[in-house]
Image (spheres, rainbow, N blue to C red):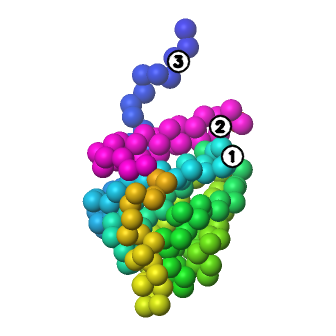
Amino acid sequence: GADPGCRQTFPWGSENTDILSHYKKLINIRQSNEVFQQGSFNIYPCNIPDILLYTRELGTGPNSTAICVFNRGEDPLQVTLPESLSSKLATNQILVNLLDQTQTVEITNTSHVSFVVSGQTPVIFLNLLNPTSDDTSTDDSSTSSDDSSPGKSIPFIFSIGCLAAIITVMMILRNYHKIRRD
């Protein structure tokens, strides 16, 4: 019969490196930011079914809070941070998406922080600018008590495994939906 085409050599030079590039970017983000290495892992409730929201937190100041949001749905969604999380942020701060640094969120009102997350996309926001001195004094009092935080603290090793699993599942789902559409 006809050759089924399954005995050909690997197509060197034409391999898809998107996943490799994505993991290299995640590794670089983790190595460049101490909050991902030592910060606590806190899950926050979100009233949108397709959204997973958690933080990595390590003290106060610049680079101390990473906000990770995963949209597993196909449509872009407007996400508003719960007040228990947004109250920990300072006004005049700019959050930068480390996966796409063109996406930023300027915090002008800590009681209402919202942004859009594209379908089947993660965002990892980090506070890269120092809060003003007026905001720092009020920010310390809101973070001094860990007992009032609604987030659930999870051991660090679980958070790395969880993050890797979530990203892998999201990429598989993205490819699955792409194949179904084609």
Marks 2 and 3: CB-CB under 8 Å? Answer: no
Q: Tell me residue 93's x, y (percent).
A: 51, 81
Residue at the location (37% across, 74% down)?
60
Element at label 3? loop
Disc 1 target residue: 74
Disc 2 or disc 1, which is closer to the eye?
1
Q: Nearer the viewer, residue 27 or 123?
A: 123
Point out the tag, 2 or 1, that comes first from the N-terminus. Answer: 1
Could you tell me the amino acid type at mark 2? His
Magenta residues, dominant SS class: helix
Residue at the location (55% across, 8% down)?
1
Alpha-carbon neighbours of circle 3 within 10 Å: few (<14), some, or many (≥20)?
few
Residue at the location (54% across, 82% down)?
91
Q: Is residue 35 magenta?
A: no
Placement of 124 over or under 180, stated as above or below: below
Residue 177's tag is 2
Could you tell me the amino acid type at mark 3? Pro
